[in-house]
Image (tube, grey):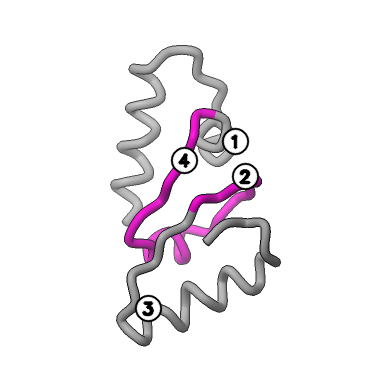
Amino acid sequence: MQHEIPVDTVKFIIKEGKKLGKMIILNPAPALIIEDTHLNSLDYLILNETELDFMSGTKNNNNKERIKECKNFINKG
C-alpha cells in the first residue's frame, strides 16, 4: 500500500493485517513519518532516496550514508 490513502487507514490496515497473518508491504509515497510501532509490523518497506532522506531526517548525498540509514530502518524491526 502507499500513503496515497489516508494515514489512519494505513495504520488500521497494518494493525489488522498483522492480526490476520497477512504480509504487509508499504511504499511510503508521498513520504510521511511512520511511528516505530508501525514500522516494526511491516514485512517490506520500499523506499526511494527522497523518502529515505525524509523519513530518516537526513539529507545524504552519497550511497554509503544511505546504506547506513537503510540498516538503521532494518534494525528498527
Q: Position of residue 67 (x, y in %)?
A: 33, 27
Please give the name of the residue rendered at 39% of the width and 67% of the height, measured from the top-left corner.
Answer: 24
Residues under labels 4 and 2: Cα distance?
9 Å
Q: Are marks 4 and 2 in contact (CB under 8 Å)?
A: no
52 to 63, vertically: above or below: below
| Mark 3 residue element | helix
Q: Nearer the viewer, residue 15 or 3?
A: 3
11 to 58, vertically: above or below: below
Q: Which residue is mark 2?
A: 31
Write the start and end of the magenta stretch as one range: 27-49
The mark nearer the N terminus, 3 or 4, is: 3
Q: Are marks 2 and 3 in contact (CB under 8 Å)?
A: no
Q: Which residue is mark 1?
A: 54
Q: Are marks 3 and 1 in contact (CB under 8 Å)?
A: no
Mark 1: give few (<14), some (14-19) or many (20+) Cα within 10 Å. few
Give the farthest residue toward the top: 62
Q: Amino acid at mark 1?
A: Phe
The mark nearer the N terminus, 3 or 1, is: 3
Identify the image quadrant of residue 53: top right
Q: Amino acid at mark 3?
A: Lys
Q: Position of residue 65 (x, y in %)?
A: 39, 20
Magenta segment's dominant SS is loop
